[in-house]
Amino acid sequence: MDCDSGCARCGASEETINHTLFQCHPARQMWALSQIPTALGNFPTESIFANLDHLFWRIPSDYDLSAFPWIIWYIWKARNDKIFENLDKDPLEVLRLAEKEAQFWQAAQSELQEENHGSVVSTTRSRVREVSFDSNYSGYRCFVDGSWKRSDKFSGTGWFCTSSNGEPPTMGAANLRRSLSSLHTEVEALLWAMKCMIGADNQEVAFYTDCSDLVKMVSSPTEWPAFSVYLEEFQSDKDEFSSFSLSLISRSANVKADNLARKVRTEPSHITYVNNIPQEWLF
Ligand SMILES: [Zn+2]
């Protein structure tokens, strides 16, 4: 049996872990393009121990080295793409993906911390149906949520809208091709809910989300350049409302939209429901 131990990417006669992660051309290119300082004869080298030692301990603290685990992981994934699917990935593109993932991970960590700090509400998180919103309001309230899981084909978006004039609530759920991150899905959920509200001619709408980054993004769009395309769309849609707001609520106050988004995420095929969902589908 012919067991090929050579490197599929560069043709080197032996593919070691160190070769794949640090010495093969595409890996070298990624390290060279990354924020991590490289120096001839110092990093990357022939020794996996020296290379890991460099990454863990030798980088001056004024460099941002937080992305290196993701860079390693993405080099490995690109190597597998080549071996199993014969795909050649552009090293710069792969590096950008790795760095983006690292950023999202960090953002998720700080969001988790915030949530843990705000533990006043978390005691009531489980199985709470309704928070005591002031029942005196005008126009509409629209609760939005997104649901995202890396391993799933779709991401889910959902909204649940109540009216101040006694009309029965309306709702929507749609799955979309899985977007880049859970935050992308939250933005897509808001944009879709806004479009549905515009379509129903609901002009005075207070939107609610349990995603604090979404609220931050909408209030200071220039600080989120990676989302600029979404935010331009947001801005022009927002102009369609006579009254618009987006407020942060706890997750327990957002269960209906959350359920809609989560259920539709795991549906096997593409689905868009508006207004015609049987109640049992919700809970
Ligand atoms: Zn190679």
Image (spheres, rainbow, N blue to C red):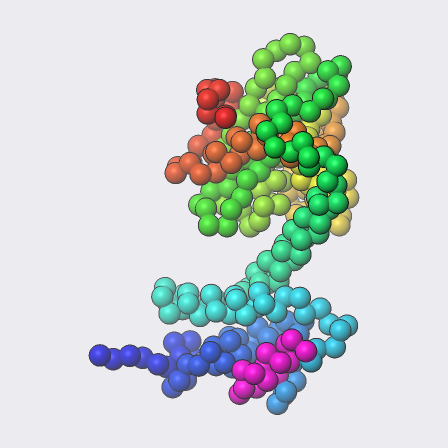
Residue 130 appears in the picture as rendered: yes
Most distant residue in the top direction:
166
Taking the magenta stretch, the answer to whether it contains residue 49 is: yes
Residue 221 image point, x, y percent: 74, 44
Magenta stretch, residue numbers = 43-57
Q: Which residue is at 39% across, 37% downward?
A: 269
- Residue 161, magenta (yes or no): no
Residue at 56%, 76% (x, y): give it. 29
Is residue 203 visible in the rendered image? The answer is: no
Camera-side residue of 52 and 223:
52
- Main secondary structure found in the magenta portion: helix
Q: For the point 31% across and 79% down, which residue is it?
A: 4
> Residue 67: x percent and y percent?
63, 66
User: Which quarter of the picture shows residue 54?
Assistant: bottom right
Dividing the image into 4 quarters, which one contains the N terminus? Answer: bottom left
Foreground of the two, 199 or 37 = 37
In this rendering, the answer to whether 9 lies above or below 128 is below
- The vertical placement of 240 against 69, above or below, is above
Residue pictured at 44% horizontal, 70% vertical: 79
Q: Is residue 136 above or below residue 57?
A: above
Task: State the image coordinates of residue 46 (x, y, percent, origin top left).
Answer: 53, 87
